[in-house]
Amino acid sequence: MAFSNTSKLLCALIALNSAPLYAADWTHYDRNPDFQPTTLPTGAISNIEELLKVKPMLRIGPMADAKALPVNENTWVINGYFYGPVIIETENGLLVFSSGENTEDGSNFRRIIREQISTKPIIALFYDHAHYAKGASTLLDGDKAMIVAHPDSNKILRESGSLTNPLIPELLPSLDGRAEIHFGSKHPTTGPDARMDGTNLELGRESGWMPATKTLTDGETMTVDGVTIQAFHAKTDTEDSLTFWLPESKMVIDNVLWPIVPNLYTLRGDRYRDPQEWMKALRKIRELEPEIEISVGGGSLPLRGKENIAEAGNALHDSVAYIYDQSIRLTNLGVPMDQLGNNIHLPDSLRKHPYVNELYGQFETWPEAIAERSQGWFSGYAEDLHRLPREVYANNLIKLGGGAGKVLQAYKDAMAKGEYLWAKDLATELYYSDRDNAEYRQALANVFRTLAQYSPGSIVRNFYTAAALSLEGNQDFSLGVVQPAAWVKEDTNRAVNSMRTRLNPELATGAEGVLSFNIDGNVSALHVRNSVAEYVPNPGSHYRPVDATIKVDSDIFTDYFRGELSTKDFLSKSTITGESAKLMGLFDEYHRLPMYPTEALLNN
């Protein structure tokens, strides 16, 4: 009997919503009765199954033991850092690819180069992508090197935060706060919640970025001291990635062929990462047929042999293709975005390859971003259009369950049976019903910590452990941090512009006025009206005259912007006219809010 297209679609939807096909990646946490996490030498308790799978392919390790690893007779890569640079010795100097995340990295890399490779000057520094371009000043240490990058590199580095290149610059505080958690910057170094070695970055350290002095477009070739280098543009985790092809040595240096499936969505938030672009970059490497491949930012040991490189590249390519195509297929079948991750399972033919692993990100956290890229946040299902405030929903659900005591007991029963995701749901509602209740906070912390210890991916683990620590009172973890002082001082007018997002609409009701800022001679203004603040780059030509002025030096303004000076103290250190105090009082002062605040902190 032939089915109509409508009948086929209905059968597919029924199948997708049946129990057997829901046995997916949530089973890291609910279908592992015999699983036991491992306690590492630091005391960290974690799921290390994926680490063991890929470890033979990695060059990460204790940074104190970092060393130069020979690749061929004139090429080395620094082992120990997952983003250690590649160094090529030429007749007259050194070519270095990547510079590190901060000035300390640059200094360490230079020391290793001097001690283990050569004392020749660095004559060219290549940025393979924006993330590791911030050790340049100390890496070069006065060497007169050309700095080579993608044409967009300088713009991206000037506008980016710790590791983000935001579409909305004013969201940097949120993105950088999440990045701190993502990379374990605030995590303890010992104990059960300790971060995993080799997967963390110390965000916020001093940047030694230096602007590129030479750019390479897609396909462009240059020769440096006898070495021919061709660049290919690759949109991966940054939009300025370059793949470098060295035809004489048949070597590729890239930010593409990672020893882990690349994050198609990153939990810290960032621009959309188009899987089609990443696959295109992988195919370009395959097309070049290199004999040596080194992923600078991906942390892999050099891959050798055309066949081995093609095999690894195809495994990575096909994993990305599978997740991308199945996300689209299931979305077209009507599967809600928040259930896509529970319905996509990589086939064993891919999962067996060591490059296809979840050491960094976890597969189930990516598909939703692919669907959302096209259709936005709304699933299409009417029940998702409007939601009760979280506290109201929590109290209603707890009442339906027979009261907080019964819900708490159900949480304890779920924990005892290893139903950790259900326990998490119950403890979450208890927390939102009473944020100050110590027992509820600890219950949620306990299940978050357990989920962390079951998680194979370092990013997921970091978010779970950060949540547990925050619930227990650690205020280092926040989903909103403030831009660094260097960012504020680099462009004070940009910082004034971002202040418009701090206007408190309740305080600003009925208020109007143009507040001008003169910061080290840089003048701009905010026009407050209708409970918004319009940025005015040229107050002298604005349709409404200035009502108040604040003249101040950039150090004092930076301290205020970063929450290190109160509004009152800021004004006392400035020269003010008009209604400056009144208008400044309409803006929130910056306060770092913990990830899981108490009611008192939330309402402060």
Image (cartoon, rainbow, N blue to C red):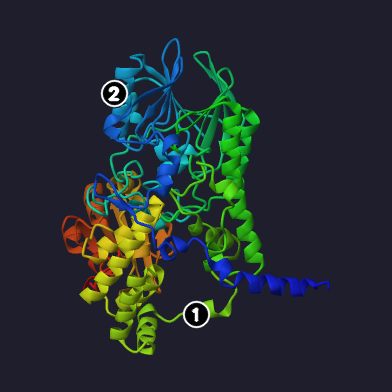
Which residue is found at the position 39% from the left and 56% from the top?
455
- Seen from the viewer's position, the closer of residues 536 and 15 is 15
For residue 61, above or below residue 551: above
Query: Going by the image, does 322 lie left or right of 439?
Result: right
Disc 1: CA contacts within 10 A as few (<14), some (14-19) or many (>=20): few
User: Can residue 473 be seen at all in this image of the molecule?
Assistant: yes
Q: Name the residue under label 1.
A: 386
Determine the image quadrant of residue 328: bottom right
Q: In front: 572, or 320?
A: 320
Q: Quadrant of residue 392?
A: bottom left
Up the image or down, 555 lies above or below 105; here it is: below
**Mark number displayed over residue 371:** none
Res. 319 in view: no
Q: Where is residue 590 in the image (x, y as percent from the top left)?
A: 26, 61
Question: Residue 338, percent across and down?
Answer: 52, 67
Q: How many labels does the image show?
A: 2
On the image, the x and y values in percent for residue 277 come to 60, 45
Q: Nearer the viewer, mark 2 or mark 1?
A: 2
Residue 280 position in % (x across, y down) = 62, 41
Q: In which quarter of the image is the N terminus?
A: bottom right
Residue at the image position 34 percent from the left and 54 percent from the top = 37
Q: Which of 491 and 202 is in front in this view?
A: 202
Residue 111: numbered disc = 2
Q: What residue type is labelled 1?
A: His
Mark earlier in primary sequence (2, 1): 2
The alpha-carbon separation of the residues under discs 2 and 1 comes to 58 Å
Secondary element at image label 2? helix
Quadrant of the snapshot with the C terminus: bottom left
Residue drawn at 30 percent across, 61 percent down: 449
Three-letter amino acid code at the position of disc 2: Arg
Q: Residue at x 66, y 68 (%)?
A: 333
